[in-house]
Structure formats: C-alpha cells, structure tokens
Image: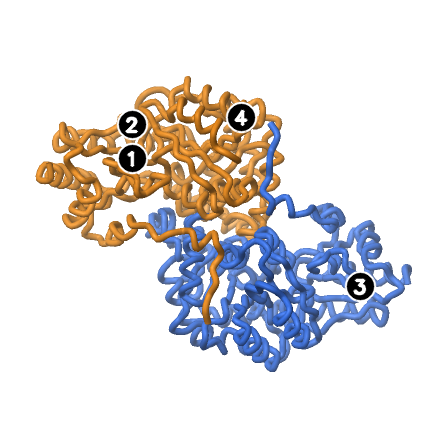
Chain colours: A blue, B orange
Amino acid sequence: MEYQFSERVKSLKPSAIREILKNSSDPSVIPLSAGNPAPDAFPQREIGAISAELLQNTPIEALQYSITEGYTPLRQHLSAYMQKKHQVGGERDEILITSGAQQVMDLLTKSLLNEGDTVLCEAPSFIGSLNTFRSYRAKLCGIPMEEDGISIEDLKKALSTEKNVKYLYTIPNFQNPSGITMSLEKRQKVYELCRDHNVLILEDNPYGDLRFAGEDLPAIKSFDREGVVMYAGSFSKVVSPGMRVGYAIGPREIVQKMVVCKQGEDVHSNIWAQIVCHRFMTQYDYEAHLQGLRKIYARKSGVLLKAMQEHFSPLISWSRFEGGLFAWCTLPESIDMLEFVKKAMERKVCVVPGTAFLTDESAPCRSFRINFSTPTDEQLTEGIRILGETAKEMA
Amino acid sequence: MEYQFSERVKSLKPSAIREILKNSSDPSVIPLSAGNPAPDAFPQREIGAISAELLQNTPIEALQYSITEGYTPLRQHLSAYMQKKHQVGGERDEILITSGAQQVMDLLTKSLLNEGDTVLCEAPSFIGSLNTFRSYRAKLCGIPMEEDGISIEDLKKALSTEKNVKYLYTIPNFQNPSGITMSLEKRQKVYELCRDHNVLILEDNPYGDLRFAGEDLPAIKSFDREGVVMYAGSFSKVVSPGMRVGYAIGPREIVQKMVVCKQGEDVHSNIWAQIVCHRFMTQYDYEAHLQGLRKIYARKSGVLLKAMQEHFSPLISWSRFEGGLFAWCTLPESIDMLEFVKKAMERKVCVVPGTAFLTDESAPCRSFRINFSTPTDEQLTEGIRILGETAKEMA
C-alpha cells in the first residue's frame, strides 16, 4: 500500500545533525551532547518512599483515570507556590498540568497557530520546541541573541514587519543552547513590546531553579497584568524528566482551549507522577532540595570551566552562564564547525553543532553546545581535552 | 489582550452533552456514564511490588529521560506477545509506545491528515477519538452500525463517493458505545475493501481482552499482509488507565512519522509506567490476570443484565454485548431520549445520551450508553431501577 502523509509531516525534513549524532548512544562515546540531569540530582529515596506509601494506601488514586486539567492538589499547591515565590500567575490565569513542558509548546501552538502563521524565537533556540512549532507549519523567525538576551532592535523590527505573529518564544534563564540569561531591562522591554503589538509571549523556564551564580531575576510573567504571557514550567530538571510532568500558567481563556486539545492528545498526564511531585513539594523540604541541586551543578560547571580554561583558551571561547546545564562554545573563523564536530565524534566525543538550534540549519554558525550534567567528571575533563586538541590541530 | 485562536480550535464547539453531564462528578450521583475500570480490576499489589523493587534497585532507569519510541524491553516483549497470541504485527510493522491509546489516534491523524480530509468512522463511535479527529479538522463520515458491525453496503458507498478518505476508524470488539462486535466475515470484508481503495484502517482494540461470552475473533490486523492496518492497543483497561500506556503496531513508514510527531508532543511517555507494564507482563502470570478480569466483568455484566431484564423489559431494549464495559440501550419512539437523560440526571442517575457518539450531535437518536464497570453492584441495580421507572412514567 502507498501512504499519503500530511503536508505538516512531509515538511519535517530529516536533520543533517541526526546523522552526525547517530552514534551518540554508543557507551564508549563521551556524551557532551545530551541534556540529562545528573544522576545524583534525582531525589530517588524520597520518590521511592512516596511511591511505596501511595501504592500501599491509596493505589486506586494512582491507577484510575483522572481529569485532564491535572491532579487538583498539585494544581492548587503549584499555583500558590509560583504566585508566592515568583509572582507567576494571577486572577486571570489558570494552571494546566502537562506531560512535560514540551506539551505546553505543543498545546499552545495547536490552540493559536494556523498553518503559515509566524512564531518569533531566539536564534539560537531549543531545537525540541522549534520542531514542535514546525510540526504545525509555523513560519519561524529567529531574532539574534546578545550577551544579555534577545536583540531588542531586531525584535522591534520583526514585530513591525512580520505578518500574523502569534507569539514570541523565549527561554529567559540559562537559555538552551546559549546559556544566556536575559537582563531585567530586556525582560521589561520584551513584555512591553509584545503587549503593545498584541503578541503573546511563551516564556519557557525549565532551568530557572538551577542558578549557581549571580542573582535571580523576575520572570517576564511576573510583570503580566494584561494576560500577555503563557509560562511553561517543568519538573524535569528539578525532580525527574522520566516522569514527564510540566505545567502551563497563563490566561484562563487560552488554557481552557489547551485543555480541550490535551484531552484529544493523551486524556491526562500519568497520575502517579503528578501525585509524587505534589507530595515531594509538600512533605519534604523542597527548597533544601533545590539548594542541593544548585550545589551539584555549581560543582559540575566548575569542572567544565577549569577544563575549558586549560584546553580551550584562547582558541575556543564560551558564553558566560550562571546556571542551567549547557555551555555555548565558539570556534575561531579558521575552523569549520561541522568538520570539527565530525572529527570530535570520530574521537568519541559528542557535542551538538550550533546549526541544530537555528531556524535555518544551513545558516553559517561557528558555535557548538556542551552539556555538563550528563557526563562524569572524568568524561567531562577528558572530553574537553580532546575537543581542545582537535581544535588546535584544525586551526 | 485579545486572543486569536487557531481555526482548528475555533471549530471545536462546546458540547450540549457536557451541560447535561456537568453534575456527574457529584458523589451522590450514580455514575453509569463513566468508563473507568472496576477498582478491583487493578493489579495493585503487583504494581506496588514492581515499583518498590524498581525504585530501590534501578531508580535512575525509572527517572531519567528515555527514548521516544518507548522502553525497549516493553517494545520487544509486546511485539513478540502480540504476534504470537494475536498474529498482530509482522515484518513490515513497527511498534511505538504511546501515552495511552488516545495518543495513537492523535499521532496517526497528525501524520496523515490534511485539514478537510475525510475519516470514515462507525456511527455511533467513541467520542474521544472523534474529537481528536475533529481537532485536526477532519471531515467525519459516519457509517451505520448493524448487530454484527459496520454496514458493509454503506462502507462501500462511502469508499467510492467520499473524497480524500485517509482512514477508517473502527473498534471491532465490544465497541464503545454500542457494545457490538464485528463478525469475522465483516472483518475480512472491511480489510479487503479498504485495501482495494487504498484506505488505511485504524483498528482500536482497548477492550479485546475483556470478553466474557462467546469466542475470540481475529484482529483485522491479523489479516494484514499489505500494510493496511494501524493497530492501537492499551493497558488502560487491563492494567491501569492512570498510567497512560498504550501502543501502536503498524507499517514502519507511518510509525516513523508518528515518532517524530510524538517527540514534539511529549518527548516520550512516563518511563516508570512503561517498566511496570513490562515487568507485570513478564514476571507475573499475565494470562491468569486477564482471566481474572473477565470473571470480574462477567459478574458485573450479570448484575446489569438481571436488573435490565427486571426494570427495562420490554420498554427499553439493549444490544447484545459479549465483553467490554458498556451496554447500549434504546428507548421506544414515544420517549424523547434527551428529555429522558435529563430527567434521569435530576434523579441522580447519570448516563450518556447516544447523540454524544454521533458525527452529527443533532441527528435523531433514541439510544443511551450505560457503563457497568464504575458503579458498585448496589448503584448499578438502583440506577437501572430508577431508569426503568423514569421510562415507564414517560411512555
């Protein structure tokens, strides 16, 4: 039988990057390309205890059908917590529990976007989200990043020239892949500009709790009095990604449409995981846990920085990062980035070519992304040494 | 701020039925409208033991990111099991683990359907799936059901007159809502007709293991030598719906597109639940468990049948059902079905009006759906008594 695929799926091209990375699961490869939380970051004992108690005492609650909006005690607790701690969410907002924050990107796009509508995004930006937008045939318009976040001049230009812009997608804290944090001034400016152009902001904040240097900055959502911002949060980096629990906090009118879409996608998210997240937040010292995570990643990033100073300087430069899981490294003009990544792969060190994160994969790019949470300390040091050597040879 | 929703979401109208059912979560209401497995059908002790062992010995496996295709041991075991037991899946097929079978409907539709393309479905059919198809702006074409399954004459007509038909959606076993099982002859005929018209079959089989009378019939997928059938399976009715684990077995080429779409929706399904399903199937006597479920539902359906014979006959009739969770009941012409459902709701008995399951909710319909797995025996008997009395008063 011959199959006819939808236009939206036909337009998803196989990525050249996949080809490069296809051996990255080989256990002899040093994995600097992933985005996994460090294994010692999981509250595994606590999750084991909560799960045992739950399946012993109220198993039906954890195993029966639940409601699409999410586990009510988790929704209530999270709403109050995010409001109190981050001033995220107000009177006009609603919360929806999703199957990872990825589903927030999907449901918002499904609710708002007609084929051909425009999504503004940071350039570079998270490939997973870009691909979700592409799967609804969004026209992606990349706005260049600067050291303090998205270029306001370019954003202004795009807002006044692009047609049918539905939202701006931004990761303000320790952005994936660049590691860049948007300054307070730019957060305010981005909010005002989008509001004035009647363009929604999709604020994705998976890494905000993983700050290990500098000062916390307010979420863009915390300025929101006019229903401009949809905030996406996630337990993937702070509890467990395998559980697939994320959430959206945003204008009630939009969240209600997202609920209808979610019902058609997966009815509701795994309820065991939702209850575990709720009990972990309320029965344990959640703030102490977050503090512990910051220590883990401060130490890991220290190992990376030391190795980069020794083996990268001055040939390969990197952007300043105060949190998160990634470092964004840039090669000198004399080295072809894709050649470098291929050569590193031959030497069993896997990093992600920067082109993977662009709206146009064929655009010129001299950067690559390093993840420091997945590899062991030894892998990290050895991987950076090999990358440094490779660059020296190619320069 | 004013919001502009996508055309696909704008076209999802609020349902008149929701209004009728909105009080169904009131605990004083007898719930004959749900579709929950019976609480005693969950293998809660086994799940508790598996989960404890898993979170004790290999917690990282259960908590870390996993791959989109699904947990490899579960995929391998399920493939072999479905092939051996049901002749489902062959050389040209691939398996994908999904977040409930609902996600199979979503991913297949996303992969195949352009807006305005046609989906053929049984009339009546499962409202959840119909809404998923609608969310991609499918044109739904309902084919009438007969006592032995879909009308072959009407299917033939639709296949030759409808434009851009992408697939036929069918639930061959104990269909939701009608309880009807498609005969062997019709299964073969449906397969041949769709194959000859180059139309895919989406075979949804959530209830197949819940047969408590009659003989098992082969899956339509078991005839498939030409890559015509996408089979959707689920652990929701046989292990736990709250876990959200389903699967698709179908042509590799299509499954690969569905994997790309799934990556953009939720990256992968909750991995703890996938491992639990795998270990429950392989470390326990799974066939004995299924046998136990059939006993539970045989008994429950017996309670329902006894009550219907006493309180419904001869005013209200019902379709023969040999398994599943539902009975499809039909009122005499003298009674307005929607009025009847409203009156029952006032008397705290909640059933689903048959119009909910039609492609056109405003079409005439004298039937309603009863679920017998959610209520207790006492609720079931009392609910049927009240429904019978209501009908007698209205006749």
Q: CA distance from mark 3 to mark 1?
A: 61 Å
> Residue A147 shows which numbered tag?
none
Amino acid type assigned to the residue bearing label 2 in the image: Phe
At label 1, which amino acid type do we have? Phe
Instruction: Pick whichever, A50 or B163, lies toward us.
Output: B163
Q: Residue at label 1?
A: B326
Q: Are marks 3 and 1 on the same chain?
A: no
Q: CA distance from mark 1 to mark 4?
A: 32 Å
Image position, residue A144 (x, y; %): 70, 69
Disc ID at residue B197: 4
Q: Nearer the viewer, mark 2 or mark 4?
A: 4
Badge 2 element? loop
Residue at image coords 82%, 65%: A331
* Label 1 environment density (alpha carbons within 10 Å; few <14, some 14–19, many ≥20): many
The three-letter code of the residue at mark 4 reads His
Q: Position of residue A192 (x, y in %)?
A: 55, 78
In the picture, the disc for residue A366 is 3
Residue identified by numbered label 2: B321
| SS of the residue under disc 3 | loop
Residue at image point 54% right, 53% down: A242
- In the image, farthest residue toward the left: B393
Q: CA distance from mark 2 to mark 4?
A: 31 Å
Rendered view: A114 above or below B355: below
Give the answer, above or below, for where A192 lies relative to A17: below
- Quick check: marks 1 and 2 in contact, CB under 8 Å? yes
Q: Secondary structure at mark 1?
A: strand
Q: Secondary structure at mark 4?
A: loop
The C terminus of chain A is located in which quarter?
A: bottom right
